[in-house]
Amino acid sequence: MAEKRRAGVAMSGSCERDGAFACESGVSALLGSSLLTLLESRPRDPVGFLAEHFAHLSAQDDDAGPEHQAVSRALWNLSLAHHSQRSAFNSNTRTAFDLLTRDRGAGVVGVRGRLYTEMLRCLCSEGGLSGSTAAPLLRRVQCHDHESVPFELFRQGVLTCSVFSDYIRASQCLYGSVASASDRPAERALGQAVLETLREALEAADGDDVGRYLEASAKISPGKVAKAMAEAHPGNQQDNPVMDAQEFEDAAASLFIARVRMVT
């Protein structure tokens, strides 16, 4: 009996040491977040999904410092669910937040402003936005480097940048509908007419949820575009001023950004 008790004590001590090692090395948190990601995504090949997940994390660890690794892991988690899948998106956003706050220490809640801004910049870039298009939005939602960003503000910033990327793609499609050819700019009168239609749609959708702005732009029917074009009374394109794709995109972006609450 005494030998069994000694064996039990030894095993208990070994388990405690193993548990402490797993926690201190970050393995427990990594495995937990990976399994949560797996359960939320429910891929057809769970083993392959986890293998790709860990390979991605390993590659990031080999090529970058701790902060860049954390940003890369956060971005990877955010890429797993579209913002329209709100429950999964919010959960992935929470995981990204936790990854960026892991080293803050006891009693400190929030992501460093510098990391938050860098992550939003990367999120816009991965969403296909050019630096010039994303810059005005980032100026409204970014925080000072020394600030501590709480989760709700972090979530709102991530959602805003994700929706904005989709919104810009939708506005590019609208421009394509009024350009006579892919290699020729649209007439200014047509571009302005469509922008006015877009402005009216955004005003009708005004609210706290930025997702409503994307829904509003997506609901602009071909009939509304055709009506706006007809009312613009375009003439011969050679005789009229034009609006290129970048100018249209900038104007459409301004309509969205004007409705985003600035972080103060």
Image (cartoon, rainbow, N blue to C red):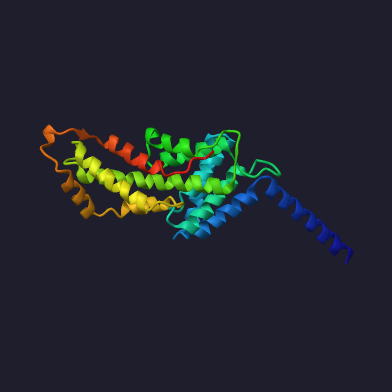
For this view, does 106 lie left or right of residue 130? right
Is residue 61 visible to the viewer in this orientation of the structure? no
- Front position in the image: 209 or 53: 209
Say which residue appears at 69% left-offset and 49% top-offset. 23
> Residue drawn 79% across and 58% down?
12
Q: To which quarter of the image does residue 154 belong? A: top right
Q: Nearer the viewer, residue 107 or 139?
A: 139
Position of residue 170 in the picture relative to residue 158 (left or right): left
Question: In the orientation shown, which residue stands out farthest toward the bottom?
Answer: 1
Give the residue furthest to the left.
236
Whether residue 195 is visible, yes or no, is yes
In this view, 264 is above or below 92: above
Q: Quadrant of the N terminus?
A: bottom right
* Residue at left offset 36%, top offset 49%: 203
Return the x and y of residue 137 as percentages of the image width and height.
43, 38
Pinpoint residue 236: horizontal percent, then vertical percent. 10, 37
Image coords of residue 87 (percent x, y)? 49, 58
Count of marks, rendered view = 0
**Dividing the picture into quarters, in which one does residue 32 lie?**
bottom right
In depth, the one of 40 and 61 nearer the eye is 40
Residue in the picture at 20% in, 34% down = 242
Q: How far across and down, in percent of the image, does residue 20 sit?
A: 73, 49
**The C terminus lies in quadrant:** top right
Residue 219 falls in image quadrant = bottom left
